[in-house]
Image (cartoon, rainbow, N blue to C red):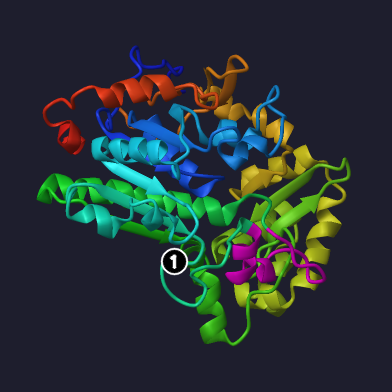
């Protein structure tokens, strides 16, 4: 069992302490990348539109009046309201960029250049600056200027065509295109920091949602290109492995089980199904055969499972060393025993009081734990950040990466 989470004593700690990140961000992709930088100790200054702020602030009001998306994505940041199109606001924006180590933006195509903060404009005066541009389809090509929302990119990447039942294609229940773009932006920024620490020069990091999600579609694309047909939509079952999917016991409990090799198939037949004769059934001789005869195989499994409770099925699966997972609701996930036993929940501050959330999933053993910073109110840090800009930069502040060796 891991030790209970103990927050750092001071807010500015962590492997990225001393790093200044300025982000003109909206919605999910860029905020997800920068929140992870904030968790590691970076100072993330979030530039928001006056009055309304990040559009994710208005997605819902489920967290005591705050948006669940905004709470999830913006912990530990400083919120600054700036009208970046006005002369004064644009001047403040440029002053922030001059103090930044990393500039992140997921504005509309061409907007950063029009504001005077495009990479090409900044490269000569700030060669050490790292810029990260996140877009739907990239900075070139015929799709460059298209609006890109998560579900639209799921469709363009072919993900919706693979998800759902044979009769009904379906989207993934999370903003997966945004999330994977944010993950690649995060890892790209970390890569650029390592490069700058070695060379002293910054980098331009570019991530498109379509290309990020396309990387995650790799197996399906290879399967289709070289196999001639796309993986079938099979609901909650695996498209290319059988048996691998949900089965419901007589008490209504649903357990998803999965087999990976022939040794497990033999054990499954002997111990779970108690049908050793199936081990040598030519319909089920190998995984490809079992997939080809999935309907017949599922009928056999369902016949056995329907006579068992969910707990009785789990006992047999444990004995046979077959992997399984219970189908949990979101409420059940929130009380998952494994997360509780590993002390993965912690509290953090917000404008609506103390909230609880998961600590970051990467555990750096032997180092101070990540900070779970406050979720900012809109414009909460405008005055303090502008006062900081009025100060003379300390020696070496513009090369903050050198504090992160």
User: With respect to residue 335, does 212 lie above or below?
Assistant: below
The answer to whether any part of residue 369 appears in the image is no
Q: Which residues are magenta?
A: 151-171
User: Could you tell me which residue is drawn at 50 percent across and 63 percent down?
Assistant: 216
Q: Residue furthest top?
A: 9
Observer-nearest of 115 and 251: 115
Pointer 1: residues within 10 angstroms few (<14), some, or many (20+)? Answer: many
Observer-nearest of 73 and 122: 122
User: In this rendering, would 212 be left or right of 234?
Assistant: left
Label 1 belongs to which residue? 138
User: Could you tell me which residue is drawn at 30 percent across and 43 percent down?
Assistant: 102
User: Could you tell me which residue is drawn at 29 percent across and 22 percent down?
Assistant: 388
Observer-nearest of 240 and 354: 354
| Image location of residue 379, percent across then percent down | 50, 26
Q: Which quadrant of the figure contains the C terminus?
A: top left
| Image location of residue 95, percent across then percent down | 29, 36
| Image location of residue 319, percent across then percent down | 63, 44
User: Could you tell me which residue is drawn at 33 percent across and 52 percent down?
Assistant: 116
Q: Is residue 161 magenta?
A: yes
User: In this rendering, would 36 be left or right of 175?
Assistant: left
- The part of the image, by quadrant, that contains residue 151 is bottom right
Q: What count of labels does the image hold?
A: 1
User: In this rendering, would 361 be left or right of 52?
Assistant: left
């Amino acid at each position: 069992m891991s030790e209970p989470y103990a927050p750092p004593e001071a807010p500015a700690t962590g492997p990225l302490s001393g790093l200044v990140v300025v982000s003109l961000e909206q919605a999910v992709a860029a905020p997800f990348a920068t929140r992870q930088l904030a968790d590691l100790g970076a100072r993330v200054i979030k530039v928001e539109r006056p009055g309304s702020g990040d559009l994710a602030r208005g997605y819902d009001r489920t967290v005591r009046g705050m948006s669940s998306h905004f709470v999830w994505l913006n912990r530990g940041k400083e919120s600054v309201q700036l009208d970046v199109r006005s002369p004064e606001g644009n001047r403040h924006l440029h002053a922030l960029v001059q103090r930044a180590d990393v500039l992140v933006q997921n504005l509309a195509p061409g907007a950063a250049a029009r504001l005077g903060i495009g990479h090409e404009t900044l490269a000569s005066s700030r060669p050490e600056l790292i810029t990260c541009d996140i877009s739907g389809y990239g900075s070139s090509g015929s799709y460059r200027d298209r609006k890109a929302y998560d579900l639209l990119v799921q469709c363009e990447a072919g993900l919706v065509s693979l998800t759902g039942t044979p009769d009904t294609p379906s989207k993934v229940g999370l903003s997966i295109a945004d999330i994977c773009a944010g993950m690649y932006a995060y890892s790209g920024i970390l890569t650029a920091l390592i490069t700058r620490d070695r060379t002293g020069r910054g980098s331009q990091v570019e991530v498109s949602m379509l290309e990020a999600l396309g990387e995650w579609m790799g197996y399906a694309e290879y399967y289709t290109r070289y196999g001639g047909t796309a993986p079938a939509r099979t609901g909650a079952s695996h498209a290319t492995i059988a048996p691998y999917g949900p089965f419901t016991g007589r008490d209504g409990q649903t357990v998803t089980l999965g087999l990976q090799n022939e040794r497990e198939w033999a054990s499954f037949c002997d111990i779970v199904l108690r049908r050793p004769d199936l081990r040598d059934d030519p319909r089920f001789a190998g995984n490809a055969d079992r997939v080809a005869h999935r309907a017949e195989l599922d009928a056999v499994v369902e016949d056995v499972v329907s006579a068992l409770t969910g707990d009785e099925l789990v006992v047999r699966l444990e004995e046979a060393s077959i992997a399984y997972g219970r189908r949990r609701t979101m409420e059940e996930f929130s009380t998952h025993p494994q997360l509780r036993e590993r002390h993965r929940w912690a509290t953090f501050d917000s404008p609506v009081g103390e909230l609880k959330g998961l600590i970051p999933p990467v555990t750096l053993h032997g180092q101070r734990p990540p900070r779970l910073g406050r979720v900012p109110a809109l414009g909460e840090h405008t005055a303090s950040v502008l006062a900081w800009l009025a100060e003379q930069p300390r020696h070496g502040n513009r090369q903050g990466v050198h504090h992160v060796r």
